[in-house]
Amino acid sequence: MPSETPRVVALFEDPERLLGAVTALRRRGFGVADVYTPYALHELDDALGVKRSRLGVVTMIAGSVGAASAIALQVWTSAVNWPLNVGGKPPLSGLAFLPITFELTVLFAGLGTAAAFLMRSRLFPGKTAHLPLPGVTDDRFALVAQGGYPEVLREILLKAGASEVREEAP
């Protein structure tokens, strides 16, 4: 089994220094394993080179399945399995199917998106969080970098404005 390189954890007091460190690491050819922030930094996605999320596609597919299920259920129950003549109305009435179709579309889309997000991010009940330092997302920013040269990483991160840099076993 190949040995993994040690991780270098750097703490930052403000987001500008964190973004500068991410840019400096990527410019020098090093990768960033993870970043911990107390709130969302929208510039961070571009700095890290994160691709656009595919959750929208999952939402569309799940919503379409919900709509198809609603229509199939209503057609089956009102026109095939137990057709009733109510006031001479047709058994397949599109306007009557609209509320249930909308509700099941929204329900399937929401539940499908939540399930896909939790599975993709490997979040499940009972999982314990592993933060590089206790309370790191309260008021400070942390960057975890992995590379073959921890001393070079340390130098880059300190030059970028890290308040603390430490090495961690993988």
Image: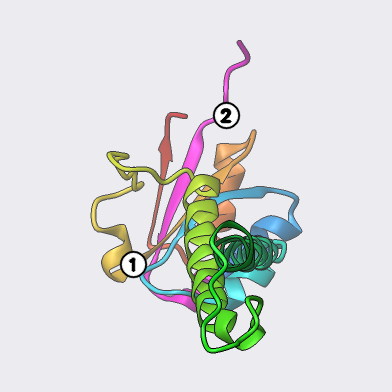
Task: Please state the horizontal and vertical placement of residue 39, each as a whole percent of the image.
Answer: 40, 74
Task: Please state the horizontal and vertical placement of residue 52, each as a whole percent of the image.
Answer: 71, 66
Q: Quadrant of residue 128?
A: top left
Q: Is residue 89 above or below residue 47?
A: below
Q: CA distance from mark 2 to mark 1?
A: 25 Å
Looking at the image, residue 99 sits to the left or right of residue 164; the answer is right
Q: Mark 1 belongs to which amino acid?
A: Arg
Q: Quadrant of residue 127?
A: top left
Task: Please state the horizontal and vertical placement of residue 79, each as a whole percent of the image.
Answer: 63, 67
Where does label 1 land, which residue?
A: 140
Q: Mark 2 belongs to which amino acid?
A: Thr
Q: Is residue 104 above or below residue 121?
A: below
Q: Quadrant of residue 156?
A: bottom right
For mark 2, give the secondary structure: loop
- How many numbered marks are there? 2
Magenta region, residue range: 1-18
Q: Nearer the viewer, residue 62 or 84?
A: 84
Looking at the image, residue 42 sits to the left or right of residue 37; the answer is right
Determine the residue positioned at 34% across, 48% down. 131
The quadrant of the rendering that contains the N terminus is top right
Residue 147 visible at all: yes
Name the N-terminal-most of marks 2 and 1. Answer: 2
Looking at the image, residue 57 sits to the left or right of residue 157; the answer is right
Q: Nearer the viewer, residue 149 or 124?
A: 124
Where does label 2 land, which residue?
A: 5
Marks 2,1: beta carbons within 8 A? no
Tell me, yes or no, whether the highlighted magenta stretch contains residue 91. Answer: no
